[in-house]
Structures are given as C-alpha cells and as structure tokens.
C-alpha cells in the first residue's frame, strides 16, 4: 500500500483511531480503533496493538493526525512566543507541556493549543513522518470551504463531554469561534443564540451542523429542531465517502473529524 494512499489518525482521550484514504478516489478504505489510555498502557503494549492493524506500517504518501484538547485559542497569525503569551492569557490553568500550532492562512490566523507531551512523543516515535493538526482548525477549514457554496449562515456545533464549540461562517468568512462550558441541551441553545444575537443574525437564516459526543450531554435533537428550523445531524458511516469536498486538507480533516466524534 503506497503512493496513492494516506494514513490519517485521530487522538482523543481513551482512543486512537487510524484510517486510510484513497487519494485518487477520495474514499475511506479502512478504519481501525484502539481504545487505551497512556496512564494504563505502556508503549510496548500499545505498539503490539498497533501492529495488529492492517493499516499500520505500510508506506503511505503522507500521515496526519488530528489532536483533541480541552482548551485551544484562535489567534492571529504571529510568532510562537507571542502566540504562547496570548494563549496563556486565555487559558491560565492549562498545564500540559506540548505546544500545537495549526496555521489557518486563509483567514490569517492560527489555532494554538497545549497537549500531553507523552501523546506527542508516542505518536512521533511510531509515526515519524506524521504532521499534527488541531480539531478546531480542521473544523474551521472545512467550514470555510463548505460555506462558500451556500447563501445561508453555517453554524458548526461540536459537542464535547462538558462543552460546545460554536463556529459561525458566512460564504467563506469566519464570523465567530468559541468554546463554552455546557451540561445540557439548553446550554447549547443558549450559547448558540448568544452568538447569533451578538452578530445580529436571524436563526431562520442559519443551517446548523452538529457533530460530537451527543450522548455525553444527552443532546435532545428534537428540542434543537424545535428552535432551529434547519439542523443537520452527522452520524457515523464507516463507508463514508469524502468526495463531496475537493479541498485536500479540509476534506480529509473534517470528514475524519465527523467520523470519529459522532456517537
């Protein structure tokens, strides 16, 4: 397996997911999930699990991982020292040790986060050619591309176990991006409506796309649809084709993001 195939992975607490994409056909060829925690597994045990996957060890054209962290900041494009200072101002209690930078040249910005150094060390040792991106940056990249093709406002809601990420886009422009603590469906509605009100956007003009750990918040889709006329719920589909979006970075990143997060 080489040349026309790429290996894409996702790391979030408790799970490492590997997937192979056919670059020419833009289709998902294989998916392998490994549930584990670095606190409970040593590197040797995990490596044995990795080697069981038919996706591991082949000669791929490129390898990329999405990294999931609880805290991240969308910052203007700037040098690393300035980015670190701005991140610490927004996330004073963030103690993880590895910096992650996901540039977004289309909007002259970047997503900055900190993650577990042990996670990066492990992935770098086992996938030395891999590049790393943050899930927020991937969601923005995809949203910028998709929103160019529609006249309505696009609202991406990414549900986490204790929070919601609200991303608003309009015809290829990022309008709003922030993460809010959330425990129930009412919280999700409150923060979405808050963002729409700040931008003076009518909710009838918004298409809402939802992905994430919906069970963690007991997300009530019927309630969302009662207040929002157009809600799209992204469900897991192992045979998911990614051919609808042609941008190679945004395409792969967010298709895999949806696949890994939706439960």
Image: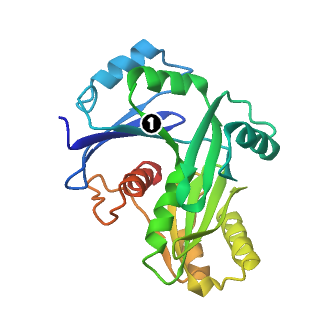
Q: Is residue 116 above or below residue 224?
A: above
Rendering coords of residue 230 (x, y %): 51, 80
Q: Residue lying furthest left in this view?
A: 1
For the point 46% across and 35% down, the residue is 15
Q: Is residue 101 above or below residue 142?
A: above
Q: Nearer the viewer, residue 158 or 96?
A: 96
* Quadrant the N terminus occupies: top left
Q: Is residue 204 above or below residue 30?
A: below
Sort mark 1 into few (<14), some (14-19) or many (20+) by Cα contacts within 10 Å: some
For the point 81% across and 39% down, the residue is 92
Q: Is residue 83 above or below residue 250?
A: above
Rendering coords of residue 223 (x, y %): 59, 74
Element type where label 1 sits in the image = strand
**Left or right of 260 on screen, residue 177:** right
For the point 68% across and 41% down, the residue is 79
Label 1 sits on residue:
131
Q: How is the image coloured?
A: rainbow
**Left or right of 242 on screen, residue 134:** right
Rendering coords of residue 110 (x, y %): 61, 50
């Amino acid at each position: 397996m080489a040349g026309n195939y790429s290996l894409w992975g996702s790391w979030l607490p408790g799970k490492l997911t590997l997937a192979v994409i056919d670059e020419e056909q833009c289709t998902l060829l294989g998916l392998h999930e490994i549930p584990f925690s670095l606190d409970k597994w040593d590197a040797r045990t995990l490596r044995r699990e990795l080697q069981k996957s038919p996706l591991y060890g082949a000669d791929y054209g490129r390898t990329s991982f999405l990294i999931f962290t609880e805290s991240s900041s969308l910052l203007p494009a700037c040098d690393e020292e300035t980015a670190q200072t701005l991140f610490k101002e927004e996330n004073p209690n963030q103690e993880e040790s590895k910096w992650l930078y996901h540039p977004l040249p289309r909007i002259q910005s970047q997503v900055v986060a900190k993650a577990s150094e042990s996670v990066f060390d492990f992935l770098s040792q086992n996938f030395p050619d891999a590049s790393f991106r943050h899930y927020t940056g991937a969601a923005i990249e995809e949203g910028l591309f998709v929103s160019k093709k529609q006249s309505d406002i696009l609202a991406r809601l990414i549900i986490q176990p204790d929070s919601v990420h609200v991303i608003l886009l309009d015809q290829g422009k990022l309008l709003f991006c922030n993460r809010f603590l959330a425990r129930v469906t009412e919280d999700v509605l409150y923060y979405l409506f808050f963002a729409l009100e700040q931008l003076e956007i009518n909710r009838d003009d918004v298409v809402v796309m939802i992905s994430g750990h919906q069970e963690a918040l007991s997300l009530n889709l019927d309630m969302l649809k009662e207040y929002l006329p157009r809600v799209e719920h992204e469900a897991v589909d192992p045979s998911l084709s990614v051919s609808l979006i042609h941008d190679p970075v945004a395409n792969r990143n967010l298709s895999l993001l949806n696949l890994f997060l939706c439960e």
